[in-house]
Image: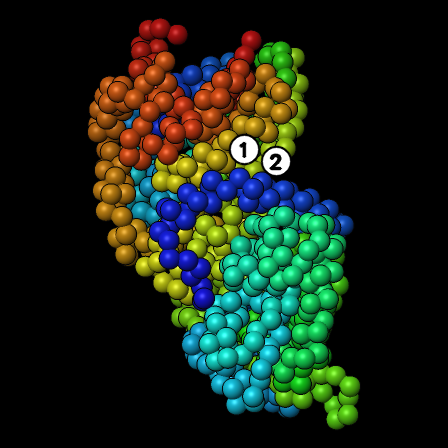
Amino acid sequence: MKVTLFTTCIVDFMAMNVGKATVELLEGLGHEIDYPTNQTCCGQPMYNTGYVEKTKGTIKHFIETFEHAEVIVSPSGSCVSFVKEYPHILADDKVWKERAEKVASKTYELSQFLIDVININEISAKLPGKAVYHSNCHTARFLKVKEQPLQLLSKVEGLELVDFHNSDKCCGFGGTFSVKMGDISAEVADEKARYIQEANPDYLIGADFACLMNIGGRLSRIGSNIKVMHIAEVLNSK
Amino acid sequence: MGIKINDQSFKKNLKKNLNDDFMRAAMVKAQDLINKNRANVLSQLGDGNYQEWQKLSGEVRAHAIENLDFYLNQFAENVVKNGGNVFFAKDAKEASQYITNLAIEKGVKKVVKAKSMVTEEIGINHDLIDAGVDVKETDLAEYILQLDDWNPPSHMVVPSLHLNKTQIRDVFAKNGYSGKDIPEDLAAFARAQLRNEFVTADMGIYGCNFAIAESGAITLISNEGNIDLCTSAPELQVAVMGMERILATYEDADICISLLARNAVGAKNTSYTTFVNGITEEGAADGAKEFHVVIVDNGRSKVLKSQFKEVLQCMRCAACLNICPIYRQVGGHSYNSIYSGPLGVVLTPLLAGYDDFEELPYMCSLCGACTEVCPSNIKLHSLIHEHKRVLAEDKKASTFWGAGMTGAGMVFSRPWMYKLGTGVAPLMTKPFMVDGKIKRGVSVLKGWTDKRDMPALEKVRFRDWYTSRSKGGNK
Ligand code: SF4
């Protein structure tokens, strides 16, 4: 299948490896990658800060950039759940709303794509060690993608997945929340990091780089050795 | 007191609470315990059934709000039929004045009061005290807070969550307690003190969990039994209700009561569910001889006409506080409002205006946990987002963020600007780098970097890697 990739802005300039792993993983599974180089951001940071009107230009740019696609896949459940909001945000304009609906209906988070669309049974990944999975709020709660990442991770050779206290709770990122209310956000991230440490894993895995950056930022500050990995990187490990 | 609980700036208030290690540990413990119990009791409803119940109670509440004028009229007529009086108060002042005047007119010397959010909202205590009436809070937690120089409540269901038993012992010592900080002993002391108050009070004041339109009954749901003493001992009684607390029928109440206790404290039911039906029969040993219901608007009809209408469905179970990751860290007093947590974030600015509370809508990471748990099926996170929109777009609250977001909007809708901007960004973050990470920050980044490292921006962006690779370059 020809897969059109939306890597997200944050992966583009802060986590090149996540994008790279996504490409290699999908190509390894025999898919052709289409990467529109005009892509920027889904618009979520502006929207969530309250600037709905100012977000519309970005949303329309996204639609124009991606509407040619057969499927759109992204390594960020949060951004995908926001793309699903587009029709609602552009509801006032019939034409744009329809274009938004088409784009939204063919956009998938990476693990959702792998399990729900192409139904893969096997993954030839190998990563020895113990891991915890941080379930990102927008992916799990809004996009309702909870089981797919866990299913995929259970297929990774050598990887032992363990739970940790309050694993389904927010890590405190929340986009601009983490800078606007930076001190509260840091306390939430601190608690998350503590519970992760209590489980004593080798890896912290997530399906959204932003949350990983937030929790990882705290782990790094307290000198933890836990390696932070995006699920695409895990599934691409050999 | 009213809705606002102190005059400190939002930032100062927040800082104080973030430094209160005891309070914060108590919040974490309480949230975990209540949520464990809640999950347990909800799982007994059977797989997936809770969502059905939630939908149903949401519908029941929405129906009542949708037809509020009809049901309020029906309710008021029935209260009068039952021998009671109804007063519609347009604001807090009118409500409080009505009750205070009543107390003065009837020569009331002492009032026993049961915990209720709306009586906090209208600030009745201080008005009564100013009028020379002795007021006794009878809910154990509220009694503690009253003795602690009217320390404001920090939770809708567990108002003194922020105090520990030693602090409570010290508060009681002011009133003659000389025992240890053993919870049972403290409760026994409070009970002994309060028993006498009930029998000597001239007036009882309580809230209303639900008002049943079809019968004119006030429903009270409690655990301590103090409310039932307020509804039985004094001959003059006043129920105060927010005008949205209405339900059409007993059947509707059944659904809501079933979810209220489960969500509030993780119990199937509370110890007492009482229906007060106006004045008592001639010759009965207890109950009200004179009964008043004060129905408080105080901004609610404005909410009813707004895009925030859904929030009136709230049944004040506090499940949203108990699940909120922000409330967990900062505690109830940080919201500077008697209504804290996600419900407070939505409701407070609506009832008390944005001027004092414009920071509140940002006390939310939009994680959606509150929406997931709410038994009234309120999309809390969407309403919080709507507040952010109103502040950003209609009120133009922050020019700093507005300018930032205008810039972001321009960059993200113009690929050439995006490519240029992300290309030079690593250079701009250089001054904040230590050991390959962003560890220092000014302005907006400070809150982040005080306790977290931020990864450095990539020198080679993903797009650069991809483009050079597709041209046959590095892999
Ligand atoms: S908003 Fe919902 S969860 Fe929060 S207190 Fe009200 S009913 Fe309970």
Dots 1 and 2: beta carbons under 8 Å?
Answer: yes
Circle 2 residues within 10 Å: few <14, some 14–19, many ≥20 = some
Q: Is residue B200 left or right of residue B302?
A: right
Chain of the residue where label 1 is placed in the rendered structure: A
The part of the image, by quadrant, that contains residue A119 is top right
Identify the residue at image location x=54%, y=65%. Answer: B117
Q: Report whether residue B125 is seen.
A: yes
Q: Give A218 or B233, whichever is nearer the viewer.
A: B233
Q: Is mark 2 on a helix, strand or loop?
A: loop
Where residue B217 appears, as percent x and y from the top left, is 66, 79
Foreground of the two, B320 or A11 = B320
The front one of A212 and B34 is: B34
Q: Is residue B85 left or right of residue B466?
A: right
Viewer-side residue, B475 vs B166? B166
Which residue is depicted at the point 48% across and 35% down?
A187
Q: In this view, does B317 lie to the left or right of B45?
A: left
Q: Which chain carries label 2?
A: A
Q: Quadrant of residue A149?
A: top right
Residue at which label 1 appears: A191
Dot 1 falls on a residue whose secondary structure is helix
**x then y, percent, for residue B290:** 63, 88
Residue at left offset 22%, top offset 24%: B420
Q: Is residue A198 left or right of residue A37?
A: right
Residue A203 drawn at (x, y percent): 57, 18
State whether residue A233 is above or below residue B218. above
Task: Identify the residue under disc 2.
Answer: A166
Q: Which amino acid does label 2 sit on?
A: Asn
Determine the residue positioned at 51% across, 52% down: B332
